[in-house]
Amino acid sequence: MERPAGQVDRNDRVDYPADPSAALEIMMERHGNDVLRTAFFYLGDRHLAEDVSQEVFLRAYRHWTSFRGDGSVKAWLAKITVHLCRDRLRLKSASEVPADPALLRQDAGRAAGRGAEEEAMRRLGRAGLLRHLAALPPHYHEALYLYYYLDLSTKEIAEATGAPEGTVRGRLSRARELLAERLQREERTS
Amino acid sequence: MTRSDRELARRFKEEADEFWFRDVRFDDALKQKVRDRIGKERAAGARSMRVRKTALGALALASAAALLLVIVPQVSPDRQPASTVILSGAGGPGPSPAGGAGDVLVMEGATTPAPFAGGMPSEGPAVREGVSWTPLSAEEAAEAFGPGLAMPGWLPDGFSLRQIGAFGEREGEVFAVTLMYMSEDRTFWLTLRKAGRPEFFPAWQTVDINGAVGYLNAAPPAGGMPAPAEAGTDGAPPGAPPTEAQGTVPASAPEAPAAPWPAAELHWFAGGVQYELQGAITGEEAVKIARSIPLATEEN
């Protein structure tokens, strides 16, 4: 019996079915957290992030049959997420939403109340790496998050963000140097 | 990734999961919201189809009439092509159910909406530019199309085969065959087309057609006669919510103008043949007709 061919995601090692509904269930199960967290990383707003993450999977469902499987499903979803988040950020004025994800999260903490902000800062104080990351120039945050948290390759990051791969490599390299300097300085101080 | 890179990634993930994303999870409620939104999109698609159903139904009748108007002169002894056998074994041309049809089907080199464009529902069998359409008998169609040509073993009450037409770009070539079925007041077409890959209709309801994935867009007629596909045949994974299986307009959906006949369009693919069923039938009838057709196999 003939069936439409499914998609094999070599990176995920998952044989995705051709049927969009069935593929959607697998995508949500495997990549739901990454999509939502990436949206939260960019937008700093839980409700906005949830809304965007739903839209990501809707789009993935609608376009599943045109997904060629050249890259991983994960990278494809990340690309959709990044684009949707950027669209959302464009809809707001620059004064309303700062572009720095770290600042966005602080804003979210403020919106949730002073207690939540203090708790967030207290927790951040224990998060050595993230504290140093937050102190880096904003354009390094995206590359570090996509590379170290989502495990995307520099090529996939370039495709998702629209930046040349060389630029991505350069930012990662410089971000690593800056992080290393800060971590070493902290070790010496302590 | 170097060792220090891996260590950096480990710390990044640990801290991010603990401090940024501790409660940020794509949970079952969010998954359900996605399914609900897809269900609403499907319902909207069904409503849209109801709106255009009037045109589809009218076109169905008009096309049938046009077919007869175009074909009947050819069956006269002095005009019938040697290779053309009209309505052989199909009960002969019935009375035209609607008058004044116009040129819905055009013979040579016609430019009308192509039913083979893929991806979008079409409004009855039409002929694309540069494609000729030739009426054939069932035997001739089977010979021209090959063993992949198969007919329904089940038809809704009152329906019978009224016309078979073959499409080709060159003389002797047949890449698609359309079979027209009519009852007293309804018409549907079954088109079989040779294809290298299946067409997809992502926003449509999926149904099982003897193991093949079918894409169904169906709308009930005004005043009832709902046309849902059978439960559990929508291709949804186990545990998928009821909305995944709904192909009809929910009770709460705004009513759109609807005709007194149903409308359905069903596409599926097997063995290098793309099947397309469309016309004034319910979704349930479409699925039942489709399942009664022996699927083509690669050996064909």
Image (cartoon, rainbow, N blue to C red):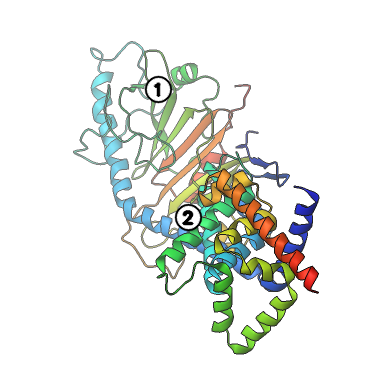
Tags 2 and 1 both on a single chain: yes
- Give residue B269's mark: none
**Residue beneath the point at 63% across and 54% down:** A174
Residue annotated with mark 1: B88
Question: In this orientation, which residue lies closer to the viewer: B118 or A45?
Answer: A45
**Residue beneath the point at 50% across and 51% down:** A62
Residue annotated with mark 2: B227
Badge 1, how many Cα within 10 Å: few under 14, some, many 20+? some
Question: In this orientation, which residue lies closer to the viewer: B48 or B96?
Answer: B48
Q: Quadrant of residue B167?
A: top left
Q: What's the amino acid at mark 2?
A: Ala
Q: How many marks?
A: 2
Number of the front mark, 2 or 1: 2
**Residue beneath the point at 72% across and 63% down:** B12
Q: On screen, B147 above or below A104?
A: above
Chain letter for mark 1, please: B
Query: Going by the image, does B134 lie left or right of B14?
Result: left
Chain letter for mark 2, please: B
Query: Going by the image, does A12 lie left or right of A54?
Result: right
Q: Quadrant of residue A155?
A: top right
**Residue beneath the point at 29% across and 37% down:** B63
Quadrant that contains the C terminus of chain B: top right
